[in-house]
């Protein structure tokens, strides 16, 4: 079974680049080496949003919270179970 965990945050005005760097410099290193981590992928979108998707073969480890001053609102988190892959 594969679990996907999605984490999405909207940066404070003009701080999208800093939030993106934080994901690469803090969040991803905090997850690396976690049991069951199979894959990570980072996306950016309009509105200074950053999306991190992690795939797990074991119980997912939560993405740490970024510094509050980087955020326009609290990060959103969703977990999914993979049902079909082509």
Image: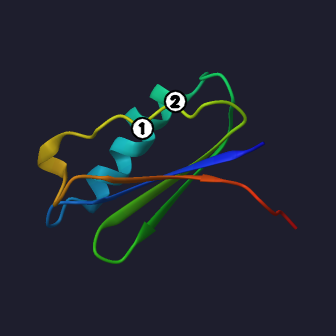
Label of residue 31 in the image: 2
Label pair 2/1, CB-CB below 8 angstroms = yes
Q: Residue at x 44, y 59 (%)?
A: 51
Rendered-image quadrant of the N terminus: top right
Taking 31 as reference, is 16 above or below it? below
Q: How many marks?
A: 2
Position of residue 59 measured from the top left corner of the image (x, y, whole percent) = 60, 31
* Residue 8 in which image quadrant: bottom left
Position of residue 63 measured from the top left corner of the image (x, y, whole percent) = 42, 38
Mark 2: which secondary structure?
A: helix
Q: Is residue 36 left or right of residue 77?
A: right
Q: Residue at x 23, y 60 (%)?
A: 11
Mark 1: which secondary structure?
A: loop
Question: What colour scheme does the image use?
Answer: rainbow
**Residue marked by disc 1:** 63
Taking 16 as reference, is 58 above or below it? above
Taking 73 as reference, is 69 above or below it? above
User: Mark 2 or mark 1, which has the lower sequence index?
Assistant: 2
Q: Residue at x 22, y 53 (%)?
A: 74
Instruction: Point out the residue furthest to the bottom here.
Output: 46
Q: Is disc 2 surrounded by few (<14), some (14 to 19) or many (20+) residues within 10 Å?
A: some
Out of 46 and 9, give the one closest to the viewer.
9
Position of residue 68 measured from the top left corner of the image (x, y, whole percent) = 15, 44
Q: Is residue 78 left or right of residue 47?
A: right
Rendered-image quadrant of the C terminus: bottom right
Q: Is disc 1 surrounded by few (<14), some (14 to 19) or many (20+) residues within 10 Å?
A: many
What distance separates the C-alpha of mark 2 from that of mark 1? 7 Å
Label of residue 11 in the image: none
Q: Is residue 36 left or right of residue 19?
A: right
* Residue 67 in which image quadrant: top left
């Amino acid at each position: 079974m594969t679990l996907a965990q999605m984490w999405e945050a909207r940066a404070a005005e003009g701080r999208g680049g800093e939030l993106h760097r934080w994901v690469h410099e803090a969040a991803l290193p905090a997850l690396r080496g976690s049991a069951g981590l199979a894959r990570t992928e980072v996306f950016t979108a309009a509105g200074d949003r950053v999306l991190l998707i992690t795939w797990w073969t074991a119980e997912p480890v939560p993405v740490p919270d970024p510094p509050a001053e980087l955020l326009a609102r609290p990060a959103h988190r969703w977990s999914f179970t993979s049902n079909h892959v082509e």
